Amino acid sequence: MRKPTPPAKPEPNQRNSSVGPRSVKRRIILEVLKGQISVPEACRKHGVTQGEFREWADEYHRVGVDALKVNKKGLEAEYRAEVKRLKSKIGELVMENEIRKEAMRPFSSVERTLNGSLLDDDGPKP
């Protein structure tokens, strides 16, 4: 008499299909994380082993951590765009300042004339 061969281990994406889609697994994990139910209770309720639950929880944690990682290329592109925007703003401000200086040039010569020749310490000259 021949012993039946054990079933092949399912692929990672097919694992625990008896529980249902990932959304169900996520809901079970969140219930445990929020303290609404204990791990043993959740496993009994949904017919899974604690080892299976731990695998789900580890995957859930790993995906969450990856989601929080900063996209360095995207961040670098944002920095470059910000630097470009600020350089443009600096250029605008420099141009505005030059225009103001140019506009004030006629008044500064009048002011120098008033301060230098017409007004002395003794008062205005006749």
Image (tube, rainbow, N blue to C red):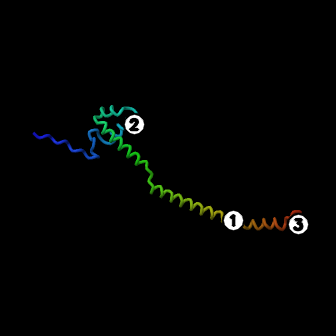
- In the rendered structure, which disc, 1 or 3, sits on the residue that comes first in sequence? 1
Q: Which amino acid does label 3 sit on?
A: Lys
> Which label sits on residue 101?
1
Q: Is residue 120 left or right of residue 44?
A: right
Q: Which amino acid does label 1 sit on?
A: Lys
Q: Which residue is drawn at 66% across and 65% down?
A: 99
Q: Residue at x 38, y 46 (%)?
A: 63
Q: Residues within 10 Å of mark 2 (few under 14, many from 20)?
A: few
Q: Which residue is drawn at 30% across and 32% down?
A: 44
Residue 35 spot, x, y in % from top left: 40, 33
Q: Contact (CB < 8 A) between labels 3 and 2? A: no
- In the rendered structure, which disc, 1 or 2, sits on the residue that comes first in sequence? 2
Q: What residue type is labelled 2?
A: Leu
Of the 4 image quadrants, the one containing the C terminus is: bottom right
Residue at the spot of label 3: 125
Q: Which mark is in front, 3 or 2?
A: 2
Q: Which residue is drawn at 87% across and 63% down?
A: 121
Q: How crowded is mark 3: few (under 14 residues within 10 Å), some or many (20 or more)?
A: few
Residue at the spot of label 2: 33
Of the 4 image quadrants, the one containing the N terminus is: top left
Separation of residues labelled 1 and 3 (CA atoms): 30 Å
Residue 41 spot, x, y in % from top left: 33, 31
- Please tell me whether mark 3 sits on a helix, a strand or a loop: loop
